[in-house]
Amino acid sequence: MKSHKLLTTAGIGALMFGMTTSAMADNWRYAHEEYEGDVQDVFAVAFKEYVEENSDHSVQIYRFGELGESDDIMEQTQNGILQFVNQSPGFTGSLIPSAQIFFIPYLLPTDMDHVLDFFDESKAINEMFPELYAEQGLELLKMYPEGEMVITTDEPIESVDDFQNKKIRVMTNPLLSETYNAFGATPTPLPWGEVYGGLQTGIIDGQENPIFWIESGGLYEVSPHLTFTGHGWFTTAMMANQDFYEGLSDEDQELVREASGAAYDHTIEHIQGLAEESLNKITEACDNCTVTRLDDEQIAKLKEQAPQVEEKFVEMAGDQGAELLEQFKADLEAVTSDEE
């Protein structure tokens, strides 16, 4: 913990120094939640490259741990220290309860084409969410999927019964806790920086993340049994401090929008096949890892628990959440019915 705090303090000090020395040079500061080369970093680098190739502005990227945890970088963005931030709804849910909708199990399809069509065409994503973020002083620029969620545990999960009393790490997100309660597990909120050690020491029995993050973070080393349940996708959002964005010239606002769009297109291309590639790396590196894909019967049992999570979501998010959920389902129906 001490080393983490020193790193955070040093990082913020460097950031404040950058503010005083480079403000006149239009150096924009952008923080995200992942490591170099991970999906959020791919997006950030593509955004940076577009901005710097098409303007005199520069973009400074801060990766996981350089300025603290997810809550820290959101606070810095809202305070105007950072201009841009990439944060998943798992953490934004404390600010925007409706953002927790992504943690309703089995709401999103597992087919990547349908997921991508949904993010491109959804009224909920492209019209309703920007208004919700604006209420918190944030300009939502892009929401995008990173990958299907996979659960890793200390023992193989072959049936719903195997979830019973398993301590599964969750983000500090009440609805995600409700999901694992519904599955029969014991949800255990824990900051990301403590997850590897928690798995190693048995403080927690498992966790969930997209497969590329399980591979890049080495989670399979201490949590070797991977289970595909098809219950959801990891989604994230890139946004700007709204006062900063609204203070930009029309030309620079257009630049930011175009850079966000270019980064989105590049990132969507990047995630094609990424899960398979990451899983192959894990199985090649880990002799004792197992991979289980729950069958239709077991998944049906988990799906039976989804309505109680939906009810909890509406209870947490109120009428706004109920309206968003209705639109989500309409958008998903439109996407999946096109093929029929």
Image (cartoon, rainbow, N blue to C red):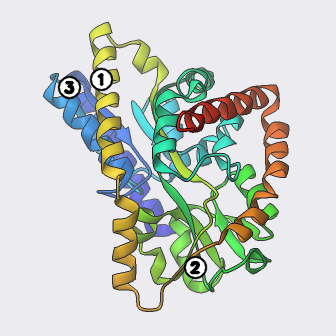
Mark 2 is surrounded, within 10 Å at the Cα level, by few (under 14), some (14 to 19) or many (20 or more) other residues, namely many
Query: How many angstroms separate mark 3 from mark 1 (CA)?
Result: 14 Å
Q: Secondary structure at mark 2?
A: helix
Do callouts 2 and 1 mark residues in contact (Cβ within 8 Å)?
no
> Which residue does the image show at 58% across and 24% down from the upper left?
123
Q: Amino acid at mark 2?
A: Leu
- Report whether residue 147 is seen: yes
Q: Nearer the viewer, mark 2 or mark 1?
A: 1
Horizontally, residue 160 falls left or right of residue 331, namely right
Picture coordinates of residue 47 (x, y %)? 28, 35
* Quarter of the view holding residue 338: top right
Which residue is under mark 1? 258
Which residue is under mark 2? 199
Q: Amino acid at mark 3?
A: His
Mark 2 vs 1, N-terminal side:
2
Which residue is under mark 3? 57
